[in-house]
Image (cartoon, coloured by chain):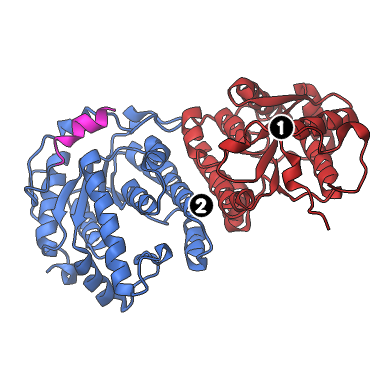
Amino acid sequence: MPTVTDTPTNTPETKPEVTSLSKRPYPGALVVVEGIDGSGKSTQLYLLKRWLEIHGYRIHFTEWNSSPLVKSATRRGKQRRLLTPTTFSLLHAADFADRCERQIMPLLHGGYLVLADRYIYTAFARDAARGCSPHWLRNLYSFAPIPDITFYFRAPLDVAVNRIVAGRPKLKYYEAGMDLGISLDRSESFRIFQERILNNYDEMVETDNFVLMDGTVKVNKLQKHMREMVAQRVDLARYAPKHK
Amino acid sequence: MSRDGKEKVSANGKKKRGEKKSSPLLFETTSRFYGSSLPGVKPEELSGTLVVIEGTDGSGRSTQISLLTEWLESEGFAVQTMGLRRSYLVGEDIDGLLEENAVTRTTLALMYGTDFFDQLERRILPALRSGLVVLADRYIFTLIARAAVRGIGRDYLHGIYETALRPDLTFWLDVKPEVAFDREFKKSQAISYWESGRDMSLSNDLFQSFIKYQSLIKKEFEYLSKRHGFIELDGEASVSTVNGHLRKRIASHLGIRSTHYKPSSALAHTWR
């Protein structure tokens, strides 16, 4: 066990009550955060990552970002506004598949604790808000491993939208859902688009076993809760640094 | 699903390789999409005709499409074509991925999917709305076959393409792998990495690898042919013979009376 001390209540080693590991075909574990922009999920995952990192755990952090393989296509599609709901979705799925097959799966098989900022549920919520059929989307991503924990950060729409709009001078075309033609006003379009995404997330809480996290709670309080949940659901001892 | 029952009727081309009369009504009564239609597409607006030519490299597809284009245009039909890696969105990116060999199978399959739907939504559907004849130089079937032999689930692949448009006619120019090898070698004096399935480590011998890979693909096509009602044509027959079968079938679908055709001087060299 690591020699570093931690706050008494949330040492990573507190009672590993492992529920699901035996069912999985790999020794690693996958912890995911989801939620709309401005829900606070990235901050919380960052803090979780720091906690584990500082204690020397075998972790890897991955985020929903373009891999070099498909970057140029995504950029071209977005710049020239060529993407339809279907090609938008497929291109992101190709991108995710690259990360999944070359990064996430090898790490899970290699016994890492993988932390993912956004996962397939982002695509389910966002692409369905664009009009793709949920059934089609579920099939599209069926190659992805199911997370051990999915934290769903939920903040009221106004809170989340204000956080984003305040920090960003100009919302991007696809980010604001302008391709849907909901509104000519970008902020208005963004708001309606995010609302649809939020509703889609809410519908997955039950079906996909989300752990609901209140994005309005104070950062350190929420982080404490998050660490407790991780220690409860993941056998952290497996990813602990070896004795010297 | 209804496609299985209905289309099997026209799927027994094996016994009678050349031509077989079947009612075009068969296709008109089935839905234009395999599953749900693409977001925002009204099937009743699509007045054009989608003709697919499938077959491995060396089966004579491209030659036939050039000839059919000329014939249809001379009959007064406007033609649009599509094919693999021809989308503006990702066509060149796939070329790049193939050169690097770093790409994994699911990513590649999904990039091909993106390429397909970009062409379908931005070029083919508008063409069909305008009543054009679309000649597809390969379609979802090649994409499904290639991914399936690499171990990606068939149901998964059919799921991705369930929003694709169902062709009015799908021809399969069937050739033996050995014949495809001869033709391809003659054309480019070499056998490509992907056409010989070298990513699958089937054999270090390139000829063996090519034959094994193409045989696997052919098996997938036999299955797809039954499932989707291909019209199978003997791709080893002469160009003019194959073209005659294609014209006859397309003419009856489009209601063209005469199937007489002689290639112009520009294409005469292909006519053998």
Q: In the rendered image of this protein, does residue B73 appear above or below residue A36?
A: below
Which residues are the magenta region?
B1-11
Label 1 environment density (alpha carbons within 10 Å; few <14, some 14–19, many ≥20): some
The percent coordinates of residue B88 (x first, y second) are: 48, 54
Q: Which residue is mark 2?
A: B107
Closer to the camera, B42 or B7? Answer: B7
Find out whether residue A169 is within the magenta segment.
Answer: no
The percent coordinates of residue B72 (x first, y second) are: 20, 51
The percent coordinates of residue A14 (x first, y second) are: 81, 34
The residue lying at 51 percent from left, 43 percent from top is A90
In the rendered image, which quarter is residue B243 located in?
Answer: bottom left
Q: In the rendered image of this protein, does residue A82 appear above or below residue B64?
A: above
Q: What secondary structure predominates along the stretch shown in magenta?
A: helix
The residue lying at 86 percent from left, 37 percent from top is A11
Give the chain coloured blue.
B
Q: Which residue is mark 1?
A: A233
Q: In the rendered image of this protein, does residue B194 appear above or below residue B142?
A: below
Amino acid tagged 2: Thr
- Left or right? Give the position of A52 relative to B58: right
> Closer to us: mark 1 or mark 2?
1
Per the image, label 2 sits on a secondary structure element best described as helix
Quarter of the image for the N terminus of chain B: give it. top left
- Left or right? Give the position of A16 relative to B257: right
Circles 1 and 2 on the same subunit? no
Per the image, label 1 sits on a secondary structure element best described as helix
- Left or right? Give the position of B253 relative to B79: left
Quarter of the image for the C terminus of chain B: give it. bottom left
Label 2 environment density (alpha carbons within 10 Å; few <14, some 14–19, many ≥20): many
The residue lying at 58 percent from left, 23 percent from top is A207
The percent coordinates of residue B237 (x first, y second) are: 11, 62
The tint chain A carries is red
In the rendered image, which quarter is residue B189 located in?
Answer: bottom left
